[in-house]
Image (cartoon, rainbow, N blue to C red):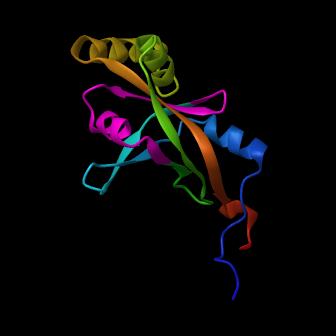
């Protein structure tokens, strides 16, 4: 019996290039009842870590405090499909969260709009960054053709 078929992976360089693009991430965390919460979320890739912005009151934060083990899927839904699945441990970062959130949002919108949005969120809730250092990365690239 052979291993489970899978499309060829991205190279390490291709993973870095792919994560430098402003795709939408899907963050999976563990709810206290054992079920999984999956949410779409904006991200940045800085110094080998995935950075995600949220508010202290979010379920994501409660879940990470309960169990820091997370999975993140970042993919391009247009053919030929490619993506990266990250398994890692999350930690919460409250230091300079407004500036970090503004920088993250600037990947997806003009800087002035990013600052306005981040400041609006900060007026209502305590901002926090979720930092995920990958323990394992699995990738796939349908453009490379055959199954491995």
Q: Is residue 75 left or right of residue 32?
A: right
Q: Measured from the top left, where is residue 93 in percent x and y?
A: 45, 22
Q: State the residue in front, 80 or 85.
A: 85
Where the C terminus falls, by quadrant? Answer: bottom right
Q: Measured from the top left, where is residue 134 in percent x and y?
A: 60, 42
Is-magenta flag for residue 60? yes
Furthest residue in direction bottom, as rendered: 1
Q: Measured from the top left, where is residue 96 in percent x and y?
A: 45, 10
Is-magenta flag for residue 104? no
Where the N terminus falls, by quadrant? Answer: bottom right
What span is in magenta?
45-71
> In the rendered picture of this protein, how many numbered marks are placed on residues?
0
Q: Is residue 110 above or below residue 143?
A: above
Identify the residue at horizontal 27%, vertical 49% (top origin). 32
Identify the residue at horizontal 75%, vertical 63% (top origin). 144
Q: State the residue in front, 31 or 50.
A: 31
Identify the residue at horizontal 60%, vertical 59% (top origin). 81
Q: Is residue 28 above or below residue 122?
A: below
Which quadrant of the view contains residue 129? top left
Identify the residue at horizontal 71%, vertical 73% (top origin). 147
Q: Measured from the top left, where is residue 107 in percent x and y?
A: 52, 26
Furthest residue in direction front, as rendered: 66
């Amino acid at each position: 019996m052979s291993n489970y078929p899978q499309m060829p992976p991205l190279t390490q360089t291709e993973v870095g290039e792919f994560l430098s693009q402003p795709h939408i991430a899907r963050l999976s965390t563990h709810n206290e009842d054992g079920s999984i919460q999956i949410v779409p979320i904006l991200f940045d890739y800085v110094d080998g870590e995935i950075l995600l912005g949220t508010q202290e009151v979010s379920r994501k934060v409660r879940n990470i405090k309960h169990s820091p083990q997370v999975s993140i899927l970042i993919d391009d839904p247009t053919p030929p499909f490619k993506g990266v699945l990250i398994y890692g441990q999350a930690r919460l970062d409250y230091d300079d969260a407004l500036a970090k959130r503004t920088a993250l949002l600037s990947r997806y919108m003009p800087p002035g709009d990013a600052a306005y949005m981040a400041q609006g969120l900060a007026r209502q809730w305590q901002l926090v960054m979720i930092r995920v250092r990958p323990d394992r990365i699995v990738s796939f690239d349908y453009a490379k053709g055959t199954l491995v």
